[in-house]
Image: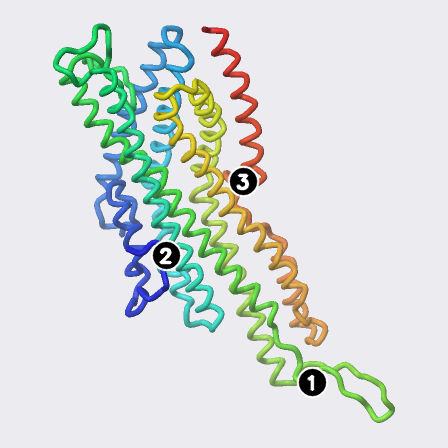
Amino acid sequence: MKLVSDASELEGVEKTEDIPYMQILRKSMWILDAWPKNPNESRIHRYYMVFIKICCLIPGIIYLRNNTGKLSSFEMGHTYITVFMNTIAFSRALMVLSKKYNDILFYFLNEMHLFNYRNKSDYSYQTHILVHKISHFFTMYLLLMMCLGILLFNLTPMYNNYTDGMYREVKPPNATFDHSVFYSLPFDYTTNLRGYLALFTFNWYMSCTCSSYFCVVDLTISLLVFHLWGHMRILQYNLQNFPKPASLLVESKDGEIKDHKYNEQEQIDIHNRLRENLHYHSVIIDFQRRMSDSFGAVLLIYFLFHQVSECLLMLECSQMDKKALLRYGPLTVVIFQQLIQLSIIFELLGSSNDKLIDAAYCVPWEYMETKDSKMVLVMLIQSQVSMNLKAMSMLTVGVQTMIAILKTSFSYFVMLQTVAEEEE
């Protein structure tokens, strides 16, 4: 697969599911069973994923409870991070089970994907190609980052075990196996080889599922935002290029300039065009509302996770030794990058909404009949509705929220670093 698309792969495509990046998305959802299902299809695997996440979350929490006060803040920080990550994965496993998630993906595939609008106009086709290229690149980039994150997260403890001599026949005294995730389990996995291999295998599997819940769900939400942004571009273009009367001004015999209205045929065309664009805008707003209802709770939990985890990751990296940087450096970069990229993507909607307001004001309502002018007024009022997606109607997802989270995370990091230094 090409990293950058030239749109040549769209030749012969008849359905949205056959678009290459949509096929990649569907295959990447396989481990989560997150592709939308018809009512008669089995959901056993989705329930299994919820169960397996509970099986990770509870032993992790018990491990935290049993070791609080016994391990240092730096040692406990790793388990806090993994417990929070499992919490996010658990919340997204529940989301995949919900009817709203299933319905919005079907609605996206069958109605709102720009592939379904490609023949509406020349500009719709151009926008479809633009969004296709963006979506293709972002799909390849994010899944590549996911694979890299899984490898680094699991290979780092293997490297630590190797350098500590844990793979030798005669192990160093008092040495223990390092793991990517620690749990409270009824068997010894820190010194016993069989226990180590069992948890090592389980952690690889859980890393794949957890990373998929992070990256694949983020990718799905981002693709929906890209296409919603594309619809906003098309509507904005339609309003900016609204036709004016064939003859705006006519010079009379005495040299006076007189304004002209639309003629009878033009009035019919204008009325139909206004009605189509007003309906189109209503469809866009409805899609945005559905997105907020489907992903709002998950996004709120996700931003709370960023608020807590980023200061912990910075705390772990502040040790500045080789092991800490190898283990937490890449993870810190990935977590920060996910917050920044998701916030910037959602900011696209806010910026496009501002442009839509200007475009609505540019519609030549002064040449229209009263009934059509009223439709323009409705469009003006409707364009004031913010397209920024809100998490649970409380938190606006965008750059401002991202900046607030980063500032707070740095403040908490300074506080936690002081506490950790006092413990030493």
| Neighbourhood count class around disc 1 (C-alpha, 10 Å): few under 14, some 14–19, many 20 upward | few
For image coordinates 20% across by 9% down, the residue present is 172
Label 2 crowd (10 A; few <14 / some 14-19 / many >=20): some
Label annotation for residue 4: 2
Please identify, in this view, whether the residue under mark 3 or under mark 1 is nearer the observer: 1
Residue at image coords 52%, 55%: 285
Q: Mark 1 or mark 2, which is nearer the start of the sequence?
A: 2
Q: Check disc 1 and give the amino acid type.
A: Ser
Identify the residue at horizontal 46%, vertical 64% (top origin).
127
- Seen from the viewer's position, the closer of residues 151 and 283 is 151
* Element at label 2: loop
How far is mark 3 from mark 2, CA to CA?
36 Å
| Residue identified by numbered label 3 | 393
Horizontal arrangement in the rendering, residue 98 relative to residue 319 (left or right): left
Side (left or right) of 241 relative to 52: right
Percent of width and height locating residue 217: 37, 42
- Horizontal and vertical percent for residue 169? 12, 14
